[in-house]
Image (cartoon, grey):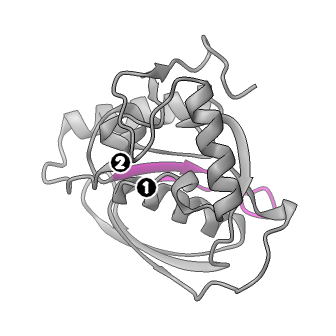
Amino acid sequence: MRPIVISGDPVLHQPAAPVSSFDSALTELIDDMFETMEAAPGVGLAAPQIGVGLQVFVYDYPEDDGTPRRGVAVNPELFISPLEIRETTDADDEGCLSFPGERFPLVRAEKCILRAQDATGKPFMLECEGWFARIMQHEFDHLLGYLYVDRLEYAFEKEAGKIGKKRGWGSRERLKPGISWMPGVDNLED
């Protein structure tokens, strides 16, 4: 398990690098990511969230019928359906382990297609919709150097900024390296 870095750490606010070696170090990283995500608890975790600037994310979110859906995406590409132009609702509330304990509404695309490689480098494709599509978009944003709070409507972005400042966290504009929390110890998501 590894600590989760908090908003303001430079690794969260810059694009991640492609993975070039599908080796034991990558396998260990992925195992650590799953362990960290489960302990947090979360439904997805990107490598930059544990301080590693590589294009990798893991997810664990069941199908609507409860069938497990767990995996890893390495060097992903994401294609999204057009966004609805509408007001946010409570159903759009989203949270992030790198901005822990807070939730804000964000309109996301209802559908997406993920193309990526698995832990061995084998290419795969997933068609996603609903909350699973939201998770894919959220984790993919981390690989581009964005947190969901960077995409909020102005009023919510301003509120998130005040919360981050009050807690001593940084932001895209105000980098502050070295702030993290340890799942199972700090319990910031409670």
- Which of the two residues, 82 or 9, is positioned nearer the viewer here? 9
Is 69 part of what is drawn in magenta? Answer: yes
Q: In what quadrant of the picture does the N terminus appear? A: top left
Which residue is located at x 67 percent, y 78 percent?
110
Q: Mark 2–mark 1 contact, CB under 8 Å? A: yes
Relative horizontal placement of residue 186, taking residue 180 as reference (left or right)? right
Say what amino acid the circle numbered 2 marks: His
Q: Residues within 10 Å of mark 1 (few under 14, many from 20)?
A: some
- To which residue does mark 2 refer? 13
Question: In the picture shown, does residue 142 fall above or below 26?
Answer: below
* Mark sitting earlier along the chain (2/1): 2
Query: Which residue is drawn at the image coordinates 32% and 34% (left, top)?
Result: 29
Q: Which amino acid type corresponds to the residue marked 1 in the rendered image?
A: Tyr
- Mark 2 surroundings: few (<14), some (14-19) or many (≥20) residues within 10 A: many
Q: Position of residue 177 (x, y in %)?
A: 33, 27
Quarter holding residue 109: bottom right
Q: Check disc 2 and report its element: helix, strand or loop.
A: helix
For the record, the magenta segment spans 56-72
